[in-house]
Every structure is written in structure tokens, then in C-alpha cells.
Amino acid sequence: MPPPLLRTLLPLLPLTTPVLAHSHLSHILINGQLYHGFDPRPNQSNTASRVGWWTSATDDGFVTPANYTHPDIICHRDGTSPAAHAPVRAGDRIHVQWNGWPVGHVGPVLTYFAGCAGLEGSEAGCTGVDKRELRWTKVDDSEPVLEFVEGAGINGGVPGQRWASDVLIAANNSWQVEVPRGLATGPYVLRNEVIALHYAAEEDGAQNYPLCMNLWVEGEEGGMELDGFEATEFYKEDDPGVWLNVSAGLKSYVVPGPTVAAGATPVPYAEQTISLFEAEGTPVVVLRGTETAPFSGGASPTAEPRARGRYDRS
Ligand SMILES: *[C@@H]1O[C@H](CO)[C@@H](O)[C@H](O)[C@H]1NC(C)=O
Ligand SMILES: *[C@@H]1O[C@H](CO)[C@@H](O)[C@H](O)[C@H]1NC(C)=O
Ligand SMILES: *[C@@H]1O[C@H](CO)[C@@H](O)[C@H](O)[C@H]1NC(C)=O
Ligand SMILES: CC(=O)N[C@H]1CO[C@H](CO)[C@@H](O)[C@@H]1O
Ligand SMILES: [Cu+2]
């Protein structure tokens, strides 16, 4: 870990806005139904029926490029699956709600799916699966990611630039994701990740926020199975989209990681809007194969590991 950069880099942040702690996914909405994420901050009460993965990121923080080959990049630090899955149909839109997004933390918003069916331990859906066995398919890379605009930075971001993260902030810190049409029925993990680039001019300065949620997709018999990449192979420390100075007259941006799968339909910027909450949804647990039952709250997720030391940067 390099020494704290806060003192030298603080002027990059707008002075009028408080420096927020970073963020996590508070919930997802599917057709107005709310499913809870996991709040990693100390002293939060997290419901057993949450579909968000447990993490030890009690500082609401991130994973850095030095850890791109470490399992922490899969579903954040010590990421551990919950018992419940949010039911959704192939082709539905999922509204992914971040718990705020700090101004100036500019970068791409990336979305991946991994299927759990067929993996060892998948009798209970994604819950008992070894996360290192997950193979991820990118379904959205938030194109065009970076647009050049007149004037001051949007939302206090970099002057002359509008990033996907600024679009996310404008939509009340949320992102819409379409579940690929034609997907096979079964349990999946949704991985929504923002890569914040405000310190990325420094080696190991990018900040990845990879957050996971369990889904139960009602798709098609004999639908498309996903086969993708290991998350520990997505990025390299010196990728041009990871190690770059966003303030040094950037002319273009190269999105890191795999390309978006053919057939996936990212939701365009114009449709990245707030979605209204109507009711609490009932998550399901997977009984076996393609059979599910409403989550009753009884089943306890796998033992949750103890939090370890905090990362030291904001
Ligand atoms: C919050 O949790 C910490 C330990 O994580 C504990 O020391 C503290 O007393 C708790 N605060 C409240 C208000 O419960
Ligand atoms: C905006 O986001 C916050 C969480 O950051 C959420 O509590 C609130 O309900 C959202 N507002 C709307 C209208 O969706
Ligand atoms: C990034 O670019 C800006 C503008 O050229 C410069 O002031 C700053 O020192 C650069 N940062 C680093 C870490 O090189
Ligand atoms: C290369 C590297 O920095 N690996 C780190 C990834 O995260 C774990 C857990 O915090 C560290 O122990 C490793 O050193
Ligand atoms: Cu931050």
C-alpha cells in the first residue's frame, strides 16, 4: 500500500462538498419491488433476507489494482454470498441503487453476470458456490463512458468531462441494468462495479467498487448459458483505463476488462433515471435445480468472516 495520498490530492476534490465516505449498493428494485443489499458499515442492521453479498469493507471502500488478481476483486473484500436471491425475468430491467456516490469519483460503471447453475455447491443457488468458480460475462460497459462537454465539471467532477459516474449521480446514484434476454432459468450473481479514477494518475491509485447481488432468473428452457471470464483476469494494473491521469487533457477513454457480450442490451444514458419503489419484494431461496421457495428467514447464510483491517485512503 503506498502512503496516504489524501494530503496532496485533496485539492482535486471540490471544496464546497463534504468528503463522503465512499459507497455500497443499498438495494435493487425489480418492477418496483425492493430487495436489500448489504450495508458494510459498523452497527448496521442487515436483514437475513438481503440479496446483497456480505463484505468486510466496513469503510465503504474499494479494491485497488494491486489486488486485481486477488479474490477480493470478485465481489469486494471477503465477499460472501447471502442465502436469498431476487426473482427476475430475463429481459427485465434491474434498478441498482448505490447509497450515494461521491462527487469527483469519476469513472466507468460496469455490469457483469455469472451463472451458478451446474457449479459445485449450487444446490442452494449461488449461496454455496466457491466464488472463484464464477465465470463472468460483461453485459454493460456504460458506453460512451466519457463525453466532452462545455464548462465546469458535472456534479463537481472534472471540468469539460461527463463520465458514466456523473450520469449515475444524476439518476439519484443509480444504474439500470437489463437482464439479458434469452438467458436460461437459474441462479446468477449480478456484479455492478464503478471504477473511480480520481487518483488513478498514481500507480495503484484506481478504486474498484465491485458489489454483488444474487438473482434468480426466470428465463427460457434451454436458454442461453453464460460462459465468461474469471474476475481475477479482468484487469491489469497498467491497463490504459486504470492507470491514467483524468486531468491531463484526456482525449479518449479505453474501458478496461472484457467486451460486452453480443446480445446484451445496455440501458442508454437517456433512460438512466430514478425508478420508483412500490413494495418490498419477496426474495427466494433455491431448493434444488430449478425449484425455488419464498425466503422464510430461517436459512442462515454461510458463516460470515470477521472484518479485517481498513484500507487507508478515501
Ligand atoms: C458500533 O460498533 C462498534 C464496534 O464495531 C462498537 O464499539 C460501538 O459501541 C457500536 N456503537 C453503537 C452505538 O452501537
Ligand atoms: C435515492 O437514493 C436513496 C439512496 O441513496 C434512496 O434512499 C431514495 O429512495 C432514492 N430516491 C428515489 C426517489 O428513488
Ligand atoms: C495530472 O495532470 C495534471 C494536469 O496536467 C497535473 O497537474 C497533475 O500533477 C497530474 N497528476 C499526476 C499524479 O501526475
Ligand atoms: C497484491 C496485494 O496487494 N494483495 C493484497 C490483497 O488484499 C489482501 C487482503 O487485504 C492483502 O492481504 C493482500 O496483500
Ligand atoms: Cu472515495
Image (tube, rainbow, N blue to C red):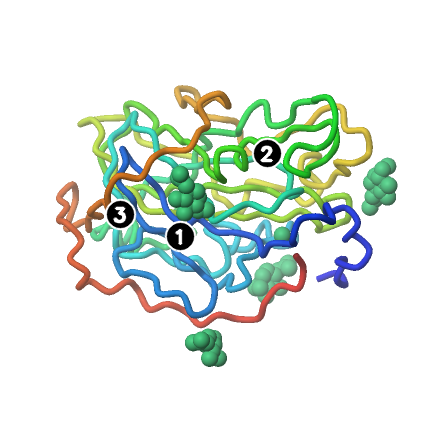
- Which structural element holds mark 1? helix
Which residue in the protein does label 3 denote? 85
Q: Residue visible at 66% across and 49% down?
A: 17
Q: Is mark 1 within 8 Å of ligand 4?
A: no
Left or right: where 79 falls relative to 5 = left
In the figure, 224 relative to 8: above or below?
above
Mark 1 belongs to which amino acid? Lys
Nearer-the-camera pick, 115 or 30: 30
- Which structural element holds mark 3? loop
In the figure, 62 relative to 95: above or below?
below
Which percent across, then down, holds residue 51? 31, 51
Give the crowd class for mark 3: few <14, some 14-19, many >=20 residues within 10 Å. many
Q: Which mark is residue 107?
A: none
Which residue in the protein does label 1 denote? 131
Which residue in the protein does label 2 denote? 166
**Quarter of image, ligand 4:** bottom right
Which percent across, then down, holds residue 199? 72, 47
Q: Give the Cα distance between marks 2 and 1.
A: 31 Å
Which percent across, then down, holds residue 236? 64, 42
Mark 3 belongs to which amino acid? His
Nearer-the-camera pick, 43 or 111: 43
- Does any portion of residue 126 appear in the rendered image? yes
